[in-house]
Amino acid sequence: MHELSIVTSIMEQSLSICKENKAHEIKEIEIEIGSLSGIDKSSFSFVIESVKHSYGLGKCNFVMNFISNNRVCNNCQTSFSADYFLGDICKKCGSGFLVLKGNSEVKIKSILIE
Amino acid sequence: MCQNCNCDHHSGHSHQHFHPHNHNHDHDDSHHVHPHEHPHEHNHEEHHHESKRIHLEHNVLEGNNLIAKYGREKLQEKGCLLINIISSPGSGKTSILESLIPRLNRKAYVIEGDQQTSNDSERLQKLNIESIQINTGNGCHLDANMIENALVELKADNNSIIFIENVGNLVCPSLFDLGENQRIVVISVTEGEDKPLKYPNAFIFANICIINKIDLLPYLKFDIETLIKNILTINPNIKIFEISALTGEGIENVKESLETK
């Protein structure tokens, strides 16, 4: 369950930044999750709830932004976002040959400290 | 201005009002004569400081990726090739290595990843293949730090090929860069033609796909053309090899492909 190691990394890195900035509390952590990151939304949320108290982040608000895939038509090169890997056709030319160009990163976008 | 810490004052911060004290004063102390109900500043709840948003755009796996990048550069300096093999459990990763490595013209090593046991590593050692076993315990994948430690222990020769047999899992291992030059995803013909569609992450980031156990095709209701079409739908640039690790069919093509990298 790689969600556990990702979540604990997010918490440790956020706490480290909080300490560097001499803040005493993290109010919010904003996370961006790419569609190809292999992160399952419900598992991710479950892990956050399970471990946040042990990191002293029980009151912290976790904002999760899941980024859709980007698919590029191999015929006309039109790029558009898509929620699914498969099954779509190009909205411009109707071709079914779409190449997936997803984002595999998990990012801490920002933290709100006090 | 906050009287306690000199921070900027905010709404909902400290304020003045009357309330009883709940501590004792020394009334003989001449400088401390006052009624017990008096105004003073205090905080009702936890002390509130100014909120500040820090924009980071920080990749959570940056630490892993930096170790992977460093390892990749070090191995390239030595002329080594690091190959990360990913698949479901039971698709035949170890069998492929048993069949492939003795045919290679380059010295080869294996870093074995499993939750428990050193069975796979022992299988390879019986063929005089140097290997190191990593047991991840409850972990579902290998990360760059584990590989860095294994490489230190392995002391691989220059110009060698080092295979990483990742933990059997098509989801988690695909997320972690281990510093590999090539990523191979293995699928066997007993697994179903639609596996690339069900588990696309493993195929999207792979350079090579090995379809294993083709010796079983006569006994299975399996359409290999549909499987190849599905693989290419997910990753049109992937190189596909159809092999049988058991009979050795097709394994020479994999060997040639890797030795020219």
Image (spheres, coloured by chain):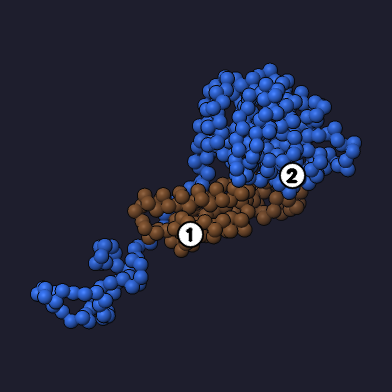
The residue labelled by disc 2 is B196
Q: How far apart are marks 2 and 1 (CA)?
A: 38 Å
Look at the picture and state if B261 lies above or below A5: above
- Tell me the residue at 72%/41% (across/down): B89
Rendered-image quadrant of the C terminus of chain A? bottom left
The residue nearer to you, when weighing B23 against B69, is: B23
Q: What is the chain identity of the residue bearing mark 1?
A: A
Disc number for residue B37? none
- Tell me the residue at 70%/24% (across/down): B126
Packing grade of label 1 (10 A; few <14, some 14-19, many >=20) is few
Amino acid, disc 1: His
Drawn side of residue B6 relative to residue A36, left or right: left
State the image coordinates of residue B92 (x, y, percent, origin top left): 75, 35
Q: Colour of chain A?
A: brown
Residue at the extreme left of the image, as rendered: B30
The residue nearer to you, when weighing A41 against B139, is: B139
Say if residue B16 shows up in the picture: no
